[in-house]
Amino acid sequence: MRLNLGDIVRLRKAHPCGGTDWEIMRTGIDFRIQCLTCQHQIWITRVKLEKQIKQILQQAPVGAEEER
C-alpha cells in the first residue's frame, strides 16, 4: 500500500474521542498519525496501520514531502 506524508485515512476502529479520520505525519517502518478530531498523535507500525485502513480519503499532492 502506498502511503505518503499528509495523506488522510479513515480507520476501521474509532478513536475514543469518536474520530475515525487521521492524517499521516511521519512515514517509515513506524508511522505517526494524528486524529483530525482531537489532534492526538500516536505511533503505529506499518503492518497494523495497513490492516486498520478502511479508506484513503485524500492523498497529499506529489512533492508535498519536500515542503514540510
Image (cartoon, grey):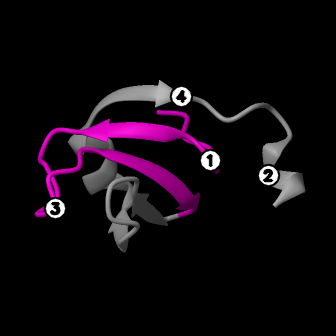
Magenta stretch secondary structure, dominant: loop
In this view, the residue in front, 49 or 21, is: 21
First in sequence: mark 4 vs mark 2: 4
Of mark 4 and mark 1, the one earlier in the sequence is: 1
Q: Are marks 4 and 2 in contact (CB under 8 Å)?
A: no
Q: Earlier in the sequence, mark 3 or mark 4?
A: 3
Q: On the image, which quarter does residue 16 sit in?
A: bottom left
Whether residues under marks 1 and 2 lie with C-beta atoms below 8 angstroms apart, the answer is yes
Per the image, the residue denoted by label 4 is: 58
Q: Quadrant of the C terminus?
A: bottom right
User: How would you rate the neighbour count of disc 3 (Cα within 10 Å): few for under 14, some for 14-19, many for 20 or more?
Assistant: few
Q: How many marks?
A: 4
| Alpha carbons under labels 3 and 4: distance apart | 21 Å
| Mark sitting earlier along the chain (1/2) | 1
Q: Which mark is residue 65?
A: 2
Is residue 5 one of those drawn in magenta? Answer: yes
Identity, as a three-letter code, of the amino acid under mark 4: Gln
Residue on which disc 3 sits: 17
Q: Which mark is residue 6?
A: 1
